[in-house]
Image (cartoon, rainbow, N blue to C red):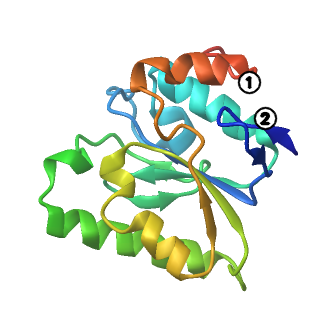
């Protein structure tokens, strides 16, 4: 997919998408597919965007790390922002290692990340880049309050 992004640069279709989890979860749920555990409007837009892109996508879970959308997980109450910086760095390295392990060669792969700074700024982006991946963050610089609009403009609504 080649189109101009919001900064006038040509956008490249990613090889994989990484989307951050959200606080809102199905509290009553036992183990469910990870993609079904989260319930906020932002999550629904992120999920719909990921699904419509037609590329593999994974969830960045504060508790479980890199999670395939169909992996069954249980409810949890953990936010990366609540962890000390050292633990966020350990989490980021674990996610980088898991991403690299999923593919025989990651050099030159384009990874598009949709997650907040607590997920990215403690080594995730730099670790993926050091592994040879090309990291894009289309929402970088867009205030969180405008994220839903960004997804809606791309046909990713809150509806399933």
Q: Say which of 40 and 112 sits in front.
A: 112
Q: Which residue is mark 1?
A: 154
Image coordinates for residue 119, horizontal then vertical, percent: 36, 53
In this picture, residue 13 sits left or right of residue 133? right
Work out which quarter of the rendered image holds the C terminus and state it: top right
Give how far apart the Cα atoms at labels 1 and 2 are: 10 Å
The structure residue drawn at horizontal position 61% and vertical position 34%, both measured from the top left corner, is 47
The crowding category of the residue bearing disc 2, from other C-alpha atoms within 10 Å (few below 14, some 14 to 19, many at least 20), is few
Q: From the viewer's perspective, is residue 84 above or below residue 10?
A: below
Q: From the viewer's perspective, is residue 114 above or below residue 28?
A: below
Q: From the viewer's perspective, is residue 104 above or below residue 114?
A: below
Residue 160 visible, this orientation: no
Find residue 3 and report its image quarter: top right
Q: Which residue of the protein is positioned furthest toward the front in this rendering?
A: 8
Residue 139 visible, this orientation: yes
Image coordinates for residue 5, horizontal then vertical, percent: 72, 36
Looking at the rendered image, the disc whose residue lies closer to the viewer, 1 or 2, is 1
Image coordinates for residue 139, horizontal then vertical, percent: 54, 37
Q: Which residue of the protein is positioned furthest toward the right in this rendering?
A: 1
Disc 1, disc 2: CB below 8 Å? Answer: yes
The structure residue drawn at horizontal position 36% and vertical position 69%, both measured from the top left corner, is 123
Pick whichever of labels 1 and 2 is earlier in the sequence.
2
Q: Say which of 125 and 10 sits in front.
A: 10
Q: Which residue is mark 2?
A: 52
Work out which quarter of the rendered image holds the N terminus and state it: top right
């Amino acid at each position: 997919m080649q189109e101009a992004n919001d900064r006038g640069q040509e956008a490249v279709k990613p090889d994989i998408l990484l989307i951050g989890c959200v606080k809102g979860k199905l509290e009553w749920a036992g183990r469910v597919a990870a993609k079904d555990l989260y319930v906020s409007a932002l999550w629904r837009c992120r999920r719909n965007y990921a699904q419509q892109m037609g590329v593999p996508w994974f969830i960045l879970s504060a508790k479980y790390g890199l999670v395939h959308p169909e992996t069954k997980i249980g409810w949890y109450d953990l936010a990366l922002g609540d962890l000390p910086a050292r633990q966020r760095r350990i989490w980021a390295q674990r996610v980088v290692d898991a991403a690299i392990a999923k593919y025989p060669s990651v050099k030159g792969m384009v990874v598009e990340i949709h997650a907040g700074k607590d997920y990215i700024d403690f080594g995730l982006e730099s670790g993926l880049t050091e592994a040879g991946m090309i990291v894009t963050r289309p929402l970088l610089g867009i205030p969180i309050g405008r994220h839903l609009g960004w997804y809606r403009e791309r046909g990713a609504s809150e509806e399933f």
